[in-house]
Amino acid sequence: MTDYDTIWRMQDEIRTVVNAVLGECIWNLSYNDRRMAIELELTQYLEEEEVDMLINQFPVPADYDGVGSKGTKFVFYM
């Protein structure tokens, strides 16, 4: 069973970090039930150093997920 309360709290933490570090630049922040992970896509493309810096700011483990149609993507496994 999916714990939506935990997912919503994690999404709020992720949104807070992105807004604090990069400003309002979230294109998509959603839970993917098939992957059992939260997916984040930004509205901008980040350089490798910026990706590493942002990943280190998240309070939950994050992985670089490649480049999406609008910007850099990250995944947060539950």
Image (spheres, helix red, strand yellow):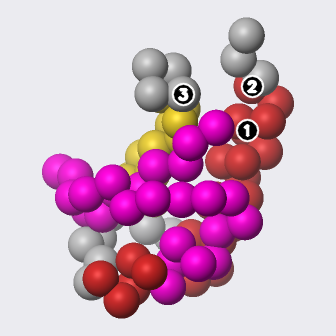
User: Residue at point 46% right, 44% down?
Assistant: 39
The Cα atoms of the two marked residues, 2 and 1, are separated by 6 Å
Q: Name the quarter where the N terminus is drawn.
A: top right
Q: Is residue 22 visible?
A: no
Write down the residue under mark 2. 4
Q: Bounds of the magenta span?
A: 53-78
Q: Position of residue 11 (x, y in %)?
A: 66, 48
The Cα atoms of the two marked residues, 3 and 2, are separated by 12 Å
Write down the residue under mark 3. 36
What amino acid does circle 2 point to?
Tyr
Residue 57 higher or lower than 3, as above or below: below
Disc number placed over residue 16 in the picture, else none? none
What amino acid does circle 3 point to?
Met
Write down the residue under mark 1. 8
Q: Which callout, 1 or 3, points to the residue nearer the camera?
A: 3
Q: Which callout, 3 or 2, points to the residue nearer the camera?
A: 3
User: Residue at point 22% right, 52% down?
Assistant: 68
Q: Secondary structure at mark 2?
A: helix
Instruction: Estimate how packed mark 1 is, as few (under 14), some (14 to 19) or many (20 or more) residues with alpha carbons within 10 Å.
Output: some
| Residue 77 within the segment the image draws in magenta | yes
Q: Is residue 10 visible?
A: yes
Q: Position of residue 48 (x, y in %)?
A: 30, 82
